[in-house]
Image (tube, helix red, strand yellow):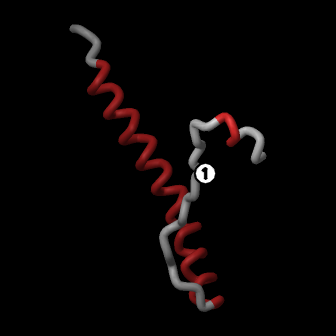
Amino acid sequence: MAFDGEKFGREVVGIVKDYLRRQLEPMEARLAILEAQAGIEKSKPVVRIRAVGRNSNDDDAR
């Protein structure tokens, strides 16, 4: 019987996702209660990444 790496990977990913879901559920519930008490609407996080130019002058601006 040959080792099926893809099957093994899917199984590991499923186990990890299940574990994380179980661990985070109580925290998500508590966070929802705190946000409701504070009157905060749930929103998606905004990730900003500074664009790095290709000019040599960009290094001088720092």
Q: Is residue 2 above or below residue 8?
A: above
Q: Quadrant of residue 47?
A: bottom right
Where does residue 21 sit, x and y in percent of width and height?
46, 56
Left or right: where 15 falls relative to 42: left
| Secondary structure beneath label 1 | loop
Q: Compare residues 17 and 62 and report the one nearer the observer.
A: 62
Residue at 65 percent of width and 89 percent of height:
38
Q: Mark 1 points at which residue?
A: 50
Q: Residues within 10 Å of mark 1 (few under 14, many from 20)?
A: few
Residue at 27 percent of width and 27 percent of height:
7
Left or right: where 5 falls relative to 56: left
Residue at 59 percent of width and 43 percent of height:
52
Q: Compare residues 51 and 9 and report the one nearer the observer.
A: 51
Q: In which quarter of the image is the N terminus?
A: top left
Q: In which quarter of the image is residue 35?
A: bottom right
Q: Is residue 46 above or below residue 50?
A: below
Q: Mark 1 is on which residue type?
A: Arg
Q: Is residue 36 above or below residue 25?
A: below
Where does residue 58 sit, x and y in percent of width and height?
68, 42
Residue at 35 percent of width and 28 percent of height:
9
